[in-house]
Image (cartoon, rainbow, N blue to C red):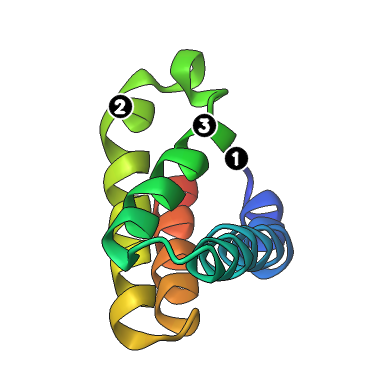
Amino acid sequence: MRNSGEKIEFVIFKNPASVVIEEITFRGLLWLFLRRLNILEWKILLLQSVVFLLFHINYVFQSPLAFIITIPVGSFLCGLLVWKSRSLAPSILVHYLYNVFIFIK
């Protein structure tokens, strides 16, 4: 069980930093790189989801259900938000709130 100090530290410091870094990396820089290679947006959406999933390979043993369902679906939805909004802000918010929900529960 996590104590309230750990929860506050995660919500305020650790989670925002990791979320921003991941979103900039996978749905910012990677997306931009693939777009500059003239890859179609829907293919980029799929590719960034796969790369994000592979980056979270440690969940295969930690939480198989998350690895098989939650991470790919979440990554796809965050990618869709970036594609349609042309902004990282919505995906950062969704990713942050998801992580907080999972950590707090």
Reading the image, the residue beneath label 2 is 68
Look at the image and tell me whether residue 1 can be seen.
no
Horizontal side of 45 relative to 13 (left or right) equals: left
How many dots with numbers?
3
Nearer the observer: mark 1 or 2; the answer is 2
Reading the image, the residue beneath label 3 is 54
Nearer the observer: mark 3 or 2; the answer is 3
Nearer the observer: mark 3 or 1; the answer is 3
Closer to the chain start, of discs 3 and 1, is 1
Horizontal side of 104 relative to 14 (left or right) equals: left
Reading the image, the residue beneath label 1 is 2
Dot 3 crowding, Cα within 10 Å, few <14, some 14–19, many 20+: some
Dot 1 amino acid type: Arg
Report how far apart the C-alphas of labels 1 and 2 lie in the structure.
25 Å
Horizontal side of 45 relative to 59 (left or right) equals: left
Q: Where in the figure is residue 74, as x and y percent of width and height?
A: 32, 52
Q: Where in the figure is residue 16, as x and y percent of width and height?
A: 64, 67
Closer to the chain start, of discs 3 and 2, is 3
